[in-house]
Image (cartoon, helix red, strand yellow):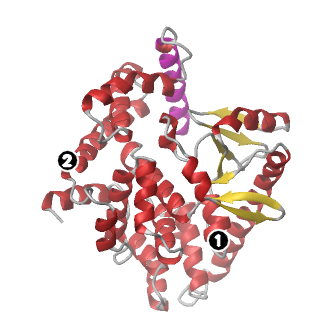
């Protein structure tokens, strides 16, 4: 691997915000056998009260895998209670989701599982994997009808760019997507994703589970967005665990993964995140197979340099957004959109990227006409800033 590639990987590895204990926790989860002393060391270094839910969830899974050997006696009742909590929470979220799925089934609307719920119901059935929410997709032609049907049955809906957050009970949100992949909002055909999915019967509800390569491509692209584009500063553990699980236990086909990633125009994202995954969990990614399956993407320093420049720009952009300085935020907004746009059009000639950019701006702003674009843009920016300030 070229020296410059290694330096870029180091930059993005730092953006994962993982400390030594996080790395040890992740690697122990994939170890064939757990030494109780290693688990005891984890508890000695962690302050459980200060952990995020994502970290506590993985720690509880590690305790179950070790049969609680190495867990300090004073912590055992607590960790067993945590495990029961996540099992109960997942069951409650799944039950709430299945109620909505039944409505859609009666209306003839097919439901495709996404991200966490796909992992939970399809690929990690025996794990107490924590889910923040439930993500599902319907075909674009069914999206408006699906939103309207949910609202008719008491769900409140918060619309986004290509998804609506539906909530009937507090803290049990369901994100309804009009596309399986966030990149597809730009007109990418997802017919292959639906064709490769398989039927899954959960308590009488017939759902669609994406193929392992499709869900892996989705996880890698979402992780890229969270780390590089949005610059989230929390530790990025869950995507690593999920992706590592799929590769080690679900039988990933590297050529098919490349085909899927090419089809969805995310091969460059997938390659970078797989290289990062191998940095965090050595021995997970078959590097020879990866380079063979992703021809032309190995050591692509031009691409990594573009990621690096964009990540620096995004950091400035989100800093302005959180500070509440509307004028600075608006000035940085076009640049943010341009960098974001280029991610999903990477490989096209610059002239073509420039040609497609205005339509992209119109799409993400939700403007019905070019005349309405300035007002729609200002309103959307102001509303997003208000929401972000409330979350800070």
Residues at marks 2 and 1 touching, judged by CB atoms closer than 8 Å: no
Which residue occupies the foreground of this view, 26 or 233? 26
User: What range is drawn magenta here?
Assistant: 374-392
Q: Secondary structure at mark 1?
A: loop
SS majority, magenta:
helix
Q: CA distance from mark 2 to mark 1?
A: 40 Å
- Which quadrant of the figure contains the N terminus? bottom left
Task: Bin the neighbour count of mark 1 within 10 Å (Cα to Cα): few under 14, some 14-19, many 20 and up.
Answer: many
Decide which of 314, 135 is in the foreground and name it: 135
The residue drawn where x is 63% and y is 74% is: 127
Task: Answer above or below: position of 249 versus 96.
Answer: below
Residue 123 in the image: state x and y as whole percent: 61, 70
- Closer to the N terminus: mark 2 or mark 1? 1
Judged left or right of residue 232, residue 171 is right
Is residue 284 on the magenta stretch? no
Residue assigned mark 2: 302
Q: Is residue 9 above or below residue 104?
A: below
- Which quadrant of the figure has residue 296? bottom left
Which residue sits at x=43%, y=54%? 261
Q: In x, y percent, where is residue 35?
A: 46, 91
Q: Between residues 107 and 375, which one lies in front from this camera angle?
A: 107
Residue at point 31% right, 29% down?
352
Q: Secondary structure at mark 2?
A: helix
Residue 285 quadrant: bottom left
Q: Pointer 2: residues within 10 angstroms few (<14), some, or many (20+)?
A: few
Q: Is residue 390 magenta?
A: yes
Q: Which residue is mark 1?
A: 128
């Amino acid at each position: 691997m070229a020296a410059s590639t290694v330096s870029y990987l180091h930059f993005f590895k730092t953006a994962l915000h993982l400390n030594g204990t996080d790395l040890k926790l992740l690697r122990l989860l994939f170890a064939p056998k757990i030494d109780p002393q290693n688990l005891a060391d984890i508890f000695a270094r962690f302050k459980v009260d200060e952990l995020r839910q994502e970290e506590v969830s993985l720690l509880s899974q590690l305790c179950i895998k070790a049969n609680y050997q190495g867990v300090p006696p004073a912590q055992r009742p607590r960790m067993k209670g945590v495990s029961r909590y996540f099992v109960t929470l997942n069951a409650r979220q799944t039950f709430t989701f299945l109620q909505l799925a039944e409505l859609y089934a009666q209306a003839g609307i097919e439901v495709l599982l996404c991200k966490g719920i796909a992992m939970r119901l399809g690929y990690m059935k025996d794990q107490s994997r924590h889910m923040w929410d439930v993500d599902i997709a319907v075909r674009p032609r069914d999206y408006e009808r699906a939103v309207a049907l949910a609202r008719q049955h008491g769900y409140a809906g918060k619309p986004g760019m290509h998804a609506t957050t539906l909530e009937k009970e507090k803290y049990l949100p369901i994100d309804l997507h009009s596309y399986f992949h966030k990149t597809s909002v730009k007109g990418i055909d997802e017919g292959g994703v639906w064709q490769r999915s398989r039927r899954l019967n959960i308590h009488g509800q017939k759902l669609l589970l994406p193929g392992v390569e499709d869900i892996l491509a989705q996880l890698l692209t979402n992780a890229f967005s969270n780390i590089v584009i949005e610059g989230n500063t929390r530790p990025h553990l869950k995507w690593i665990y999920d992706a590592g699980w799929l590769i080690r236990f679900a039988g990933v086909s590297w050529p098919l993964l490349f085909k899927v990633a090419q089809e969805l125009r995310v091969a460059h994202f997938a390659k970078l995140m797989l290289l990062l995954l191998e940095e965090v969990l050595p021995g997970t990614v078959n590097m020879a197979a990866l380079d063979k399956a992703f021809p032309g993407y190995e050591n692509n320093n031009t691409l990594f340099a573009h990621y690096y420049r964009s990540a620096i720009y995004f950091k400035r952009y989100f800093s302005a957004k959180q500070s509440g300085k509307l004028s600075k935020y608006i000035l940085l907004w076009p640049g943010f959109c341009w960098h974001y746009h280029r991610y999903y059009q990477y490989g096209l000639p610059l002239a073509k990227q420039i040609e497609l950019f205005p339509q992209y701006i119109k799409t993400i702003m939700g403007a019905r006409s070019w005349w309405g674009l300035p007002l729609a843009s200002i309103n959307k920016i102001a509303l997003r800033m208000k929401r972000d300030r409330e979350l800070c």
